[in-house]
Image (spheres, helix red, strand yellow):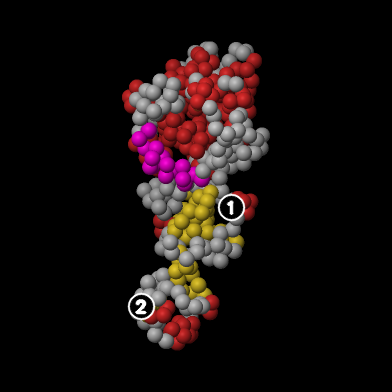
Amino acid sequence: MKWKKPTDLSELDGEFTFAEDVIDPRSGAVLISKGTPSSKVKKLDRVISYLQEAGVRKIVIFEDRPPPVPPIQEIKRLVTIDIPLISSRVIHLSLMSFKDFVREVKSEHKIDLSSIAIPVKHLFQEIMNTQAIILSLLDNTINLDYLATHALNVAILSMAIAKRLGYSYKEIQTIGISSMLKDIGMLKIPPFIVMKKGPLTEDEREQIKLHPIYSLTVLKQVKKIDTNILISAYQHHEWVSGQGYPLGLKDKDIHPLAQIIAVADVFDALTSNRTYKEKIPSYQAISKLLGEATIHFKKEIIDAFFSFSGLYPQGSVVNLSNGSTAVVSENNEGTPLRPKVKVITNYKGEFITPYVVNLKDSDLYITNVVGDIGKRSIFY
Ligand SMILES: [Fe+2]
């Protein structure tokens, strides 16, 4: 693979190939066409001197190596994205409420759904008012409480998808509550299986697959619980391909809200660290959903997800065609290849004062993805 590298005329050395046309600023004529090797340019030294005299400082050449990028941890430490995320207050409230709910289930006291319904109402308001859905998701590596962070991430994602699909306020509330509670049955699985490092045995996997059934049993004890919450929690691992569990249901037999939760669940599971596997960056998770995983889910749901995540989800660290490094801050609907980005380095990989470029209105474009600043770290 070849990479474009803007290079100072004074730094040109040895053989190289021009990656973009060299224009004479005085006449506007093309002096050297892109793709031309330096060895084929007659009197190159004189052409370079001419360009320098005419005020040209840089030309773009091809290089075999990708442009330098600072370490992702360094980027994560230094870069802030200035668009509003789902507020930390609401995130904390939701996590605390989830923990209260878990305590109630463990102590087998009377379970009260309002402890989950209230934060979900707040989450709804936040989701209506933020574009930064992917950046609002939580990292589980800090506190290792996967059950709580996963519940909240899936609630955020599935509510955002349901919003895109035009579901009503009540249905979005229902999907939020169901997403928060769908894995509550995990509490009934022996912890040594849930926390196991390394691959599960066949028998352990079968036990994990029972958790939606346990979730249904627990949630049935909640007074006046909406049947849609029960069914969508019970069916959140069913896939339209019939390859899900516990029943292996297909297509229309699966509750529409459960179909949305299933997509959100897979995305969050892929992008989370677990005791037995490493997370993958969100852009790779998106390509899985758009590629090999499409058979398992309904296309409209993937499309709705894609409409706010884009091909380069928020937080992706990318190289731009001028050699600089940028972080994707917002997706432009309809132009998934051209999101809004925050440029953080120059072409040498040195940090600069960051500035925002909307690639939709720019000649710059993304040449490759180098990583992901990951999910949001919240201590609680
Ligand atoms: Fe689950």
Residue indicated by mark 1: 72
| Disc 2, SS | strand
Does any portion of residue 96 appear in the rendered image?
A: yes
Which dot, 1 or 2, sits closer to the camera?
Answer: 1
Picture layout, residue 289 above or below residue 352:
above
Q: Is residue 54 above or below residue 249?
A: below
Query: Which quarter of the rendered picture does the N terminus lie within?
Result: bottom left
Q: Which residue is situated farthest in the left direction here?
A: 252
In the rendered view, tell whether residue 132 sits above or below residue 326: above
Q: Residues within 10 Å of mark 1 (few under 14, many from 20)?
A: some
The residue drawn where x is 43% and y is 24% is 245
Q: Residue 333: x, y in percent?
A: 39, 47
Magenta-drawn stretch, dominant element (helix, strand or loop): helix
Residue 155 pos. (x, y %):
50, 31
Q: Residue at x 36, y 48 (%)?
A: 334
**361 and 211: which one is in front?**
211
The quadrant in which residue 33 appears is: bottom left
Task: Assess whether residue 283 is covered by the magenta stretch.
Answer: yes
At horizontal 51% and vertical 35% (from top left) the residue drawn is 269
Tell me which label, 1 or 2, sits earlier in the chain: 2
Kindly check if marks 1 and 2 are in contact, taking CB atoms under 8 A apart as contact: no
Q: Amino acid at mark 2?
A: Val
* Viewport quadrant of the C terminus: top right
Q: Which residue is mark 2?
A: 30
Q: Position of residue 326 (x, y in %)?
A: 52, 57
Between 249 and 190, the one nearer to me in the picture: 190
Residue 258 in picture, x, y percent from top left? 42, 26
Around disc 2, counting alpha carbons within 10 Å, would you say few (fewer than 14), some (14 to 19), or many (20 or more)? Answer: few
User: What residue range appears in magenta?
Assistant: 281-297
Looking at the rendered structure, the kind of residue marked 1 is Ile
Which residue: 45% across, 71% down? Answer: 61
State which quadrant residue 354 falls in. bottom right
